[in-house]
Image (cartoon, rainbow, N blue to C red):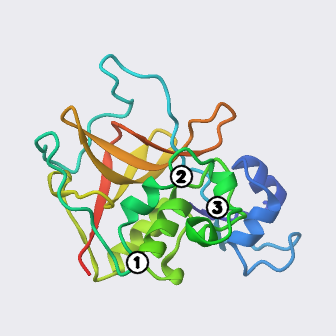
Amino acid sequence: MSYRIKSGDTLSGIASRYKTSVSALMKANPQIKNANLIYAGKSLNIPGSRDSYDHGPTRPGGNRPGGSPSTGGTQAPGSTGTPSRGPGGSPFDIAKAQLGKNAGSLKLEKGGVGSDMEDWVPNNVNCANFVSACLEQAGQIKNGQHHNAVVGLQANLDKDPNFKRVSLSQAKPGDVVSMKTPGGHHVVMFAGWKNGKPEFIGSNNINSDGSQRISMTQMNYPIMSIHQYRG
């Protein structure tokens, strides 16, 4: 999320408003050298403050709130296609190996996905951090394309000629799915179909304290885009 600084704003005030910290804001905005010196009119990157997934109450039938996936199409149950692969393997397989791990713990691991996740990202907003790291591990994106905000990662993939937007009916495991949620945005990877409904894998807010854990679940939020690797 990008915020335009207004006259009278302070970094601590902005951090409090968006439930983050001054240190996290400074890491997300390396152009700021002095926490007490910011300028009205300048844009400030809010580190994933609204890029979160609220597990929320279930509807009858197990659907999540937020409407139906809007990228179009349905697919026969079990027809998932071959997982997308990069030079380093399948991001879906890489993500699946992390199932059950807390995002906060995963970031501290040496090597693997954890080594490509940025430690400073708050533990309740790691969805883009995790997906970016899986894509890096698979060799589908470079380090410079890593982004901790959903819309930032979405924009980076739009600019990458190796990725193409596809419909839900064309999705393969490992494709990057950006969603619109009541609280902002969320990004996961397509994981296949179960009982005629799509499943997704990613860093989701399912812990009791609101922090994220790697899980595979069905969601019913409107889909903004699905990016498929074609490299």
Q: Amino acid at mark 1?
A: Gly
Q: Sequence order check: which comes first, mark 2 or mark 1?
A: 2
> Tag 1, which secondary structure?
loop
Q: 32 or 156, which lies in front?
A: 156
Q: Amino acid at mark 2?
A: Asp
Q: Sequence order check: which comes first, mark 3 or mark 1?
A: 3
Q: Which residue lies at the image location 22% right of the left edge and 51% below the top edge?
A: 71
* Residue 125 x, y percent position in the rendering: 60, 52
> Tag 3, which secondary structure?
loop
Indicate the quadrant containing the C terminus: top left, top right, bottom left or bottom right: bottom left
Q: Is residue 137 left or right of residue 192?
A: right
Cα distance in 3D space between marks 2 and 1: 27 Å
Q: Which residue lies at the image location 67% right of the left edge and 60% below the top edge?
A: 121
Q: Pointer 3: what residue?
A: 46
Q: Is residue 32 visible?
A: yes
Q: Which residue lies at the image location 43% right of the left edge and 70% below the top edge?
A: 135
Q: Pointer 1: what residue?
A: 88
Q: Amino acid at mark 3?
A: Ile
Q: 107 or 127, which lies in front?
A: 107
Which residue is outermost to the left? Answer: 76
